[in-house]
């Protein structure tokens, strides 16, 4: 018996079971996104109500099928960024070697290259988090007991 649209199937191993149609749509969303389609375009093509619904389906598919799908998308996105980088770098070299080119064009290309570089670093987790150590007075431990700090200040005020 087919279930009504919008009604989840019984859970299996903590996950709501997908109908064959839903699973097919999820796979299609993953494939199209990997191909570089926007969520708006995916929504129209696959039949979702709007961009947000397509994004929700994409996120659900990634949660469901996890690391393999994420890795495929990461590889495809990395290839697109690499292609964009190559084109920007070629354009930068051409503009930099031509003294008659508009300097604003050079600045625009340089800013675009910086953004692409940042996107690649973020995609592949290349920017390691900075570790910061916070210490209390004279390098000692931090005092985090607000109650004790307030009592100490009150004692000083009373004296």
Image: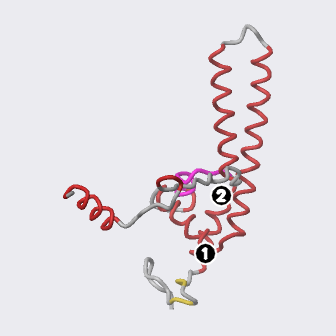
Q: Measuring from the top left, give residue 156's x and y in whole percent.
A: 26, 57
For residue 76, the mark is none
Give the residue at x 54% y 87%.
Answer: 14
Q: Residues within 10 Å of mark 1 (few under 14, many from 20)?
A: few
Tell me what residue is drawn at x 72 percent, y 44 percent. 81
- Up the image or down, 116 lies above or below 41; here it is above
Residue reaching furthest left?
158
Q: Count neighbours of disc 2 (C-alpha within 10 A) and say few if under 14, some if 14 to 19, many if 20 or more.
A: some
Label annotation for residue 32: 2
Residue 64 is labelled as: 1
Magenta-tinted stretch: 36-44
SS class, disc 2: helix
Q: Position of residue 150 (x, y in %)?
A: 28, 62
For the C terminus, the image quarter is bottom left
Disc with the residue nearer the chain's start (2 vs 1): 2
Q: Is residue 40 magenta?
A: yes
**Drawn side of residue 151 relative to residue 12, left or right:** left
């Amino acid at each position: 018996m087919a279930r009504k649209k919008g009604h989840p199937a019984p859970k299996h191993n903590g996950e709501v079971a997908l109908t064959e149609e839903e699973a097919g749509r999820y796979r299609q969303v993953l494939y199209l996104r990997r191909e570089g389609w926007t969520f708006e375009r995916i929504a129209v093509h696959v039949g979702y109500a709007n961009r947000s619904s397509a994004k929700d389906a994409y996120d659900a598919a990634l949660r469901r099928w996890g690391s393999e799908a994420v890795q495929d998308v990461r590889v495809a996105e990395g290839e697109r960024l690499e292609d964009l980088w190559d084109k920007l770098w070629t354009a930068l070299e051409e503009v930099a070697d031509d003294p008659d080119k508009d300097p604003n064009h050079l600045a625009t290309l340089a800013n675009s290259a910086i953004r692409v570089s940042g996107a690649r670093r973020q995609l592949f987790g290349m920017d390691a988090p900075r570790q910061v150590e916070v210490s209390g007075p004279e390098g000692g431990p931090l005092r985090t007991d607000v109650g004790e700090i307030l009592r100490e200040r009150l004692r000083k005020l009373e004296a």
